[in-house]
């Protein structure tokens, strides 16, 4: 954000420059990259739809904690079963078995959730690693510039004073009342910090931990994540958290005024509302 | 090696103006045409593999070892994958004889082509390593591998300076070839070929290598994925280019779209 181009307490109705160019460019670079990474990642997952804890995959012992399978029940009906920590759930129609009843397809994630839509691990990997490079380069551009221009300190990391306002901010969010002074509130800061400084590095490093060459270069990766298969599981969990973030992100954009929010992330320009002006919390 | 590979369907976009934002609604087959087989978009994206290769080669010392594990971490047999029971005639004849008449040919861009019986290979100094096998599908399996370092054979046959690749020719055709079709083959650069852990394995978990896992010889390339580690090796060829082999992509699965460099 570059809210201080104008003043820290803009007048209601005033249009400020909210997002700097790097914020906007990296946002959309990530958005595109993550879209393709997600759908190609689900394609890759489908090649072996089981997650394990440890260094290796237990075929003759048990260390799996999650799987999506097509299984035949006693009546001979094939159903999709998703198993989480030993508990099985019938997910027929979406996970395990999907597609039309006349021509069901036995695959973990359905055709509409993968790239390509058909089973093609090779192409899934090609897409995944291409966009992984874009994702990682974008991350370093963002990290470096945010350290240099103090975006990180000023806009992302909450101050200890702000931390104390978390309960108040939660109450405001529950009532869908938002400050529109162009600055992030404390819950926004925490979620952005969580995504940018925890989930992004986590998903990059767990991805690298699956690379046999990177295991030779940086064997400590295996130590910090507890083995290649645990890293694969954490990579999947980080994906789920990013999807959850995306859903909340979109809901909040809609709740906060989609036109103004979209304009600000496209052009940087953001209209400050008079609802809760001055950057102060309404008592 | 892997199974369950489905050849990509050809699809063509009738309209090029499909906005990315409509994809979740329209279904992801909207992009299939752009991603299939030999499309330019796919080829552009696949070039990232060359970047990955160069960066990893810069980052990782030529002789940097893949992690090795303790005997207690061998908790299961090595999981076989890909072809597990080749039915090619030449192979069946050797197998019937417990591979006693098998000879590994080393040829191509070398000063002194040579061939080796299994016994001759076993008599050479062996390397034992407990390593993790990572399949491109996503699973891993830890096993102990015993064999002769490939670098030893390369030294014996004296690799010519123009050689850039080691190509492994195999007995198995993965039941996809048919008469006259090339069988399984793979290729690696000379850095991986001379890597201390790159061995021609004749033993697995303190037993003779089984047919399912690639008898009589399979190569271990510990810093790459399983499909690089050719089984049922018939001969080893030193080459300056990969163009003459198969469809020219450097390996059986590479010819079906997999990346040549499988360090990731």
Image (cartoon, coloured by chain):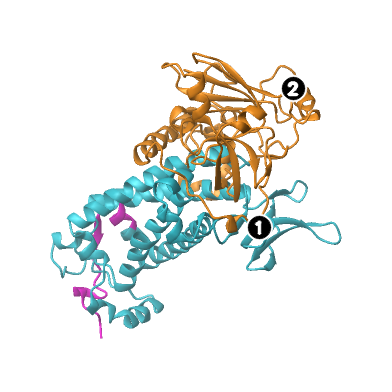
Chain colours: A cyan, B orange
Q: Position of residue A240 (x, y in %)?
A: 50, 61
Look at the image and give the residue range highlighted in magenta: A262-283
A58 sits to left or right of A148: right
Q: Is residue B109 magenta?
A: no
Total marks placed:
2
Chain to which mark 2 belongs: B
Disc 2: which residue: B178
Q: Nearer the viewer, residue A76 or A221?
A: A221
Q: Secondary structure at mark 1?
A: strand
Counting from the top left corner in percent of width and height, residue A211 is at 47, 46
Residue B255 in view (yes/no): yes
Which residue is rendered at x = 35% and y = 49% of the image?
A28
Q: Looking at the figure, which quarter contains the N terminus of chain B?
A: top right
Which of the two residues, B149 or A225, is positioned nearer the viewer here? Answer: B149
Residue A256 location, x and y as percent?
A: 35, 67
Q: Is residue A275 magenta?
A: yes
């Amino acid at each position: 954000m570059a809210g201080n181009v104008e003043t820290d307490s803009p007048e209601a109705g005033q249009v400020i420059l909210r997002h700097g160019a790097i914020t906007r460019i990296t946002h959309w670079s990530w958005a595109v990259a993550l879209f393709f990474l997600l759908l190609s990642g689900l394609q890759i997952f489908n090649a072996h739809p089981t997650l394990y804890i440890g260094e290796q995959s237990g075929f003759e012992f048990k260390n799996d904690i999650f799987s999506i399978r097509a299984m035949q029940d006693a009546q001979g009906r094939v159903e999709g079963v998703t198993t989480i920590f030993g508990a099985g759930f019938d997910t027929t129609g979406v996970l395990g078995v999907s597609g039309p009843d006349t021509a069901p397809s036995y695959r973990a994630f359905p055709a509409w959730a993968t790239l390509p839509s058909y089973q093609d691990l090779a192409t899934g990997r090609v897409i995944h690693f291409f966009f992984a490079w874009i994702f990682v380069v974008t991350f370093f551009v963002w990290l470096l510039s945010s350290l240099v221009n103090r975006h990180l300190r000023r806009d992302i990391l909450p101050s200890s004073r702000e931390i104390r306002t978390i309960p108040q901010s939660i109450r405001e969010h529950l009532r869908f009342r938002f400050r529109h002074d162009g600055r992030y509130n404390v819950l926004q800061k925490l979620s952005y910090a969580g995504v940018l400084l925890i989930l992004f590095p986590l998903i990059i490093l767990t991805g690298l931990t699956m690379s046999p060459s990177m295991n030779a270069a940086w064997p400590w990766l295996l130590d910090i994540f507890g083995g290649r298969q645990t890293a694969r599981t954490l990579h999947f969990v980080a994906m789920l958290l990013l999807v959850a973030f995306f859903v909340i992100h979109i809901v909040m954009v809609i709740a906060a005024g989609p036109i103004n929010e979209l304009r600000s992330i496209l052009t940087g320009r953001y209209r400050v509302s008079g609802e809760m002006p001055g950057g102060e919390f309404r008592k | 090696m892997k199974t369950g590979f489905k050849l990509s369907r050809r699809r063509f976009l009738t309209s090029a103006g499909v906005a990315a934002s409509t994809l979740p609604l329209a279904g992801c087959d909207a992009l299939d045409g752009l991603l299939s087989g030999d499309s330019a978009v796919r080829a552009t994206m696949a070039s990232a593999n060359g970047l990955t290769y160069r960066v990893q080669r810069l980052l990782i010392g030529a002789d940097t070892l893949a992690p090795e594990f303790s005997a207690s971490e061998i908790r299961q047999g090595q999981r076989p994958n890909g072809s597990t029971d080749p039915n090619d005639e030449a192979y069946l004849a050797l197998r019937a004889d417990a591979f006693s008449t098998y000879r590994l040919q080393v040829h191509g861009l070398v000063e002194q082509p040579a061939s080796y019986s299994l016994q001759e290979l076993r008599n050479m100094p062996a390397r034992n390593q407990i390593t993790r096998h990572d399949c491109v599908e996503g699973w891993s399996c830890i096993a102990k591998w015993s064999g002769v370092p490939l670098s030893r054979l390369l030294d014996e046959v004296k690799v010519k300076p123009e050689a850039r690749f080691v190509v492994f020719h195999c007995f198995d055709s993965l039941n996809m070839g048919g008469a006259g079709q090339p069988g399984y083959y793979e290729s690696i650069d000379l850095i991986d070929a001379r890597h201390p852990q790159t061995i021609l394995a004749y033993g697995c978990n303190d037993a003779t290598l089984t047919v399912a896992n690639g008898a009589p010889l399979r190569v271990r390339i510990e810093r790459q994925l399983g499909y690089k580690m050719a089984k049922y090796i018939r001969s080893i060829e030193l080459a300056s280019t990969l163009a003459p082999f198969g469809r020219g992509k450097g390996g059986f699965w590479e010819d079906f779209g997999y990346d040549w460099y499988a360090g990731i």
